[in-house]
Amino acid sequence: MAELFDKHGGFRRLHSFTLATIVQLETLRFCRRFLTADPRERETKFYDPKGRQYDQMVQAARGGRQNIIEGSERAATSKDTEMKLTDVARASLSELRGDYEVFILDRGELPWSVHSPEAKAINAVSLDAPAFQDDMVHESAKHAREQRKKYARWLDADDPVVVANAMLMMIGRALNMLKSLIESQGKAFEKTGGFSERLSTKRREIRDQQKDAAAPACPQCGQPMRRRQSAKGDFWGCSAYPDCKGTRPGSIAP
């Protein structure tokens, strides 16, 4: 029955997962550094008196990463669910991107143009392929930390607008990766179907095998025969038709 299940897991090797991990961690750090519920700090930080902005950004960042995980794990039995959860990850990160955009606008600034030198520099960052051995959790966390260093000049900036813009660029890149991932998942689904389709095919194969075991043998080639219908009534036809055209009267019991 193993052939019924899709390969699943493996999300820790995805660049989109690595970026989503960095985005979640850096969103936590960003909120701690630049959001405040203290009215005395409202001149220097984003004033969030009830903590709703903090919670919303943290949850959106978490949703991006966690839905990649869940979608990958659910792939074993449902490609459709895998694609839906990957799309939920995209939606969560899109929501987070909107929060960073508003933060920048609230500071009286504009998001960087994709043609700006800083945006081009961030988008030119090349992520290393992970090389995991047998300790996936530890090694993937270490890998994410190493890749984070490539963005450190922006993420560690004192200016919150610089950090927010860097996050916008990184989230945009993750969104593009997830879009490509969904497209590849869709192609795989079209080619092999999902668990339900393969289960139905397997059931048909088993039923056909059971019928073959009970059917008479073809008098010409010896292959099992299948009961068929014609204008003159039932008859047995060779299962190898059209290569073999052997028949038997339908009155012959299996």
Image (spheres, rainbow, N blue to C red):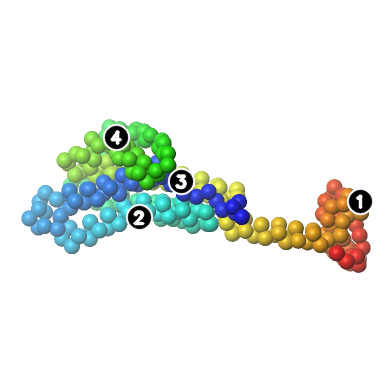
When asked about the image quadrant of residue 229, the answer is: bottom right
What residue sits right under mark 4 in the picture? 150
Q: Foreground: 208 or 193? A: 208
What residue sits right under mark 1 in the picture? 220
Comes first in the chain, label 2 or label 4: 2
Residue furthest left in the image? 40
- Which of discs 3 and 4 lies nearer the camera? The answer is 3
| Residue 164 visible (yes or no) | yes
Q: Amino acid at mark 2?
A: Gly
When asked about the image quadrant of residue 49, the answer is: bottom left
Q: Foreground: 216 or 158? A: 216
- Proximity of marks 3 and 4: CB atoms separated by less than 8 Å: no
Q: Amino acid at mark 1?
A: Gln
CA–CA distance in space, label 3 to label 4: 23 Å
CA–CA distance in space, label 4 to label 1: 72 Å
Residue 96 in percent (x, y) is at 30, 52
Residue 164 in percent (x, y) is at 24, 45
What residue sits right under mark 2 in the picture? 63
Q: Residues within 10 Å of mark 1 (few under 14, many from 20)?
A: few
CA–CA distance in space, label 3 to label 1: 51 Å
Q: Secondary structure at mark 3?
A: loop
Q: Tell me which residue sits at (28%, 47%) in the image.
A: 25
What residue sits right under mark 3 in the picture? 10
